Image (cartoon, rainbow, N blue to C red):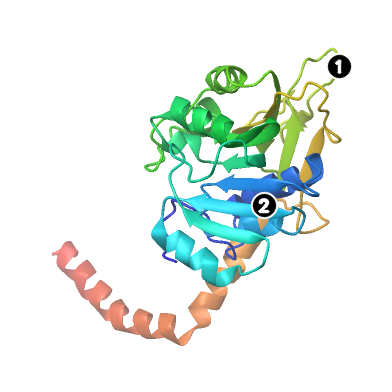
């Protein structure tokens, strides 16, 4: 599959990959998927649906892209996993047929967000569970002054919370942000739970701030979560700013030793000298 930035392609060991893997394992360890039929809406390349299929009775990945579906069908081939081309506003599944719906980084790509929620409710069983995420518009876009070209309608936290709460009787909200790995933390009333305290390198502190908002929503009022915080990590030690700068330096040194770099340098160096001579004149 072509790397466009619209969907995650695993294997690049990026912070984005940490975020996405954390979300899928968040589902695995918050929801008992044994005997469950799961829908992964906007399944993309298919890696997440494949993870869920290790635990669920059956997983159906639905994506609007024919290329993504063809790729997933070829790469992730197992008996309890299928991929179907379809739209989040017109899900190609029958009514009340799904126990768990997973929707990560999807709703911000749509203008018809209410329609997507209606479709999710249509295909879910009466006490089914939805796990959905979306970037927090304030911390993801406003604060860093960043514009994601693929996002149609991002939501502020209160907008996200109100949207989910209109369709489900019970909603539990979480915040996600990377810390040299990725952490998802419960976002609830402080009388029963305190979010992690973050201390900056200048000694100042603040509550854990989200880059992404995540909700677990259901009409099953007896539903409870087993974990308040879930971290996904690929190594034991903490990555510091020095580690990152040192890795960049070492990569640059390896590049300078390559034949390609040396060839380009010796071709361009005389041209640069000539250019400087003309500038002096």
Residue 170 in the image: above or below residue 122: above
Q: Which mark is residue 155?
A: none
Q: Which mark is residue 21?
A: 2
Q: How crowded is mark 2: few (under 14 residues within 10 Å), some or many (20 or more)?
A: some
Furthest-top residue in this view: 191
**Nearer the observer, 198 or 99:** 99
Measured from the top left, where is residue 146 in percent x and y? 43, 36
Q: In which quarter of the image is the N terminus?
A: bottom left
Residue 172 in the image: above or below residue 276: above
Measured from the top left, where is residue 141 in percent x and y? 47, 32
Q: Which of marks 1 and 2 is nearer the N terminus?
A: 2
Horizontally, is 57 left or right of 194 in the view? left
Q: Mark 1 points at which residue?
A: 192
Calculate the distance from the C-alpha at mark 1 to the C-alpha at mark 2: 28 Å
Residue 266 in the image: above or below residue 125: below
Residue 149 in the image: above or below residue 175: below
Q: Which residue is drawn at 63% across and 40% down?
A: 101
């Amino acid at each position: 599959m072509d790397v466009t930035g619209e969907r995650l392609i695993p294997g690049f060991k990026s912070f984005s990959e940490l975020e996405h893997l954390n979300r899928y394992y968040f589902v695995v360890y918050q929801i008992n998927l044994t005997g469950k039929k799961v829908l992964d809406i906007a399944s993309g390349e298919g890696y997440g649906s494949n993870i869920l299929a290790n635990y669920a009775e059956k997983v159906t990945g639905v994506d609007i892209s024919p290329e993504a579906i063809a790729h997933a069908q070829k790469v992730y081939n197992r008996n309890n996993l299928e991929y179907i081309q379809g739209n989040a506003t017109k899900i190609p599944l029958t009514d009340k047929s799904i126990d768990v719906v997973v929707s990560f980084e999807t709703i911000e790509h749509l203008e018809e967000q209410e329609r997507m929620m209606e479709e999710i409710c249509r295909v879910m069983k009466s006490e089914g569970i939805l796990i959905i995420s979306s970037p927090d518009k304030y911390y993801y876009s406003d604060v860093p002054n960043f514009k994601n070209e693929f996002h149609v309608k991002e939501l502020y936290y209160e907008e996200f919370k109100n949207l989910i709460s209109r369709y489900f009787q019970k909603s539990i909200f979480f915040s996600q942000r990377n810390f040299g790995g990725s952490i998802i933390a419960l976002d609830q009333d402080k009388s029963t739970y305190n979010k992690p305290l973050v201390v900056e390198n200048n000694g100042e502190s603040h509550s854990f701030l989200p880059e992404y908002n995540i909700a677990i929503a259901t009409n099953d009022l007896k539903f409870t979560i087993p974990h308040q915080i879930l971290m996904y990590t690929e190594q034991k030690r903490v990555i510091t700013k020095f580690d990152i700068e040192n890795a960049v330096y070492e990569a640059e040194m390896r590049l300078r030793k390559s034949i390609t770099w040396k060839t380009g340098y010796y071709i361009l160096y005389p041209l640069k000298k000539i250019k400087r001579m003309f500038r002096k004149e």
